[in-house]
Image (cartoon, grey):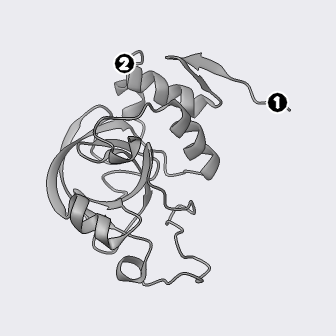
């Protein structure tokens, strides 16, 4: 069965989730209506001050080495990625799996992972290497915007669909 598409802001969106994200990003949807349904205290569209650190898929962050069957796999089951929509870790009590945040200086992140030290208003941003964690980020206190509240689930195809509708950000160093 062919996928259905919708044209939004000059882009084709393949799923209802991608359409919702595209509308929220374009300001054409009222995000507060959906936010009341999700768990956690953070409202969609709200600015939240967090402490943000960086992590990698490597042994220094996860205890896993290349070759391990779970190397590079997040709590939600998707692979770590850095791009227009990067995987990040957060406390699901504050930012449920699937929550999309805009992080100044980093770009858009989607909560796909958790961490033993990531509690409360802390987030961990994925970077491909330790060098990038230290040179590009370190540890910062930042005000993030909740773009879309997650429902506790995320898949590779959902990430791909959402990445298609997110325009590169000038705050995203990967947008070249």
The front one of 125 and 83 is 83
Task: Name the residue that disc number 2 marks.
Answer: 27
Query: Residue 30, how many percent across, how many down?
Result: 38, 19
Q: Is residue 163 above or below residue 91?
A: above
Outermost residue on the left side: it is: 141
* Label 2 or label 1, whichever comes before in sequence order: 1
Query: Residue 29, how many percent across, how many down?
Result: 42, 18
Mark 1: few/some/many CA within 10 Å (<14, 14-19, 20+) = few
Query: Residue 78, how many percent across, how many down?
Result: 56, 59
Residue displayed at 54% across by 68% down: 73
Q: Is residue 175 above or below residue 93?
A: above
Q: Is residue 90 visible?
A: no
Q: Picture quarter containing residue 59?
A: bottom left
Q: Picture quarter containing residue 91?
A: bottom left
| Left or right placement of residue 131 versus residue 140 in this view | right
Q: Is residue 52 above or below residue 43?
A: below
Task: Name the residue that disc number 1 marks.
Answer: 2
Outermost residue on the front side: it is: 176
| Left or right placement of residue 115 versus residue 9 in this view | left
- Asked if marks 2 and 1 touch (Cβ < 8 Å), the reply is no
Looking at the rendered image, the quarter that the C terminus falls into is: top left
Residue displayed at 64% across by 46% down: 157
| Left or right placement of residue 95 versus residue 58 in this view | left
The image's mark for residue 164 is none
| Left or right placement of residue 110 versus residue 121 in this view | right
Q: Picture quarter containing residue 26?
A: top left
Mark 2: few/some/many CA within 10 Å (<14, 14-19, 20+) = few
Q: Secondary structure at mark 1?
A: loop
Looking at the rendered image, the quarter that the N terminus falls into is: top right
Q: Is residue 138 visible?
A: yes
How many numbered marks are there? Answer: 2
Q: Secondary structure at mark 2?
A: loop
């Amino acid at each position: 069965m062919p996928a259905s598409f919708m044209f939004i802001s000059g882009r084709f969106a393949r799923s209802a989730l991608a359409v919702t994200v595209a509308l929220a990003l374009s300001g054409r949807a009222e995000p507060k209506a959906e936010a009341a349904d999700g768990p956690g205290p953070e409202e969609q569209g709200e600015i939240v001050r967090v402490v943000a650190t960086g992590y990698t898929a490597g042994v220094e962050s996860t205890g896993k080495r290349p070759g391990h069957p779970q190397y590079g796999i997040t709590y939600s089951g998707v692979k770590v990625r850095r791009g227009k929509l990067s995987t990040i870790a957060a406390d699901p009590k504050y930012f449920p799996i699937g929550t999309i945040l805009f992080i100044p200086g980093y770009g858009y992140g989607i909560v796909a992972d958790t961490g033993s030290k990531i509690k409360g208003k802390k987030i961990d941003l994925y970077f491909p290497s330790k060098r990038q964690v230290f040179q590009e980020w370190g540890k910062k206190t930042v005000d993030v915007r909740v773009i879309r509240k997650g429902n506790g689930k995320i898949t590779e195809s959902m990430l791909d669909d959402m990445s298609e509708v997110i325009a590169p950000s000038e705050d995203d160093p990967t947008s070249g």
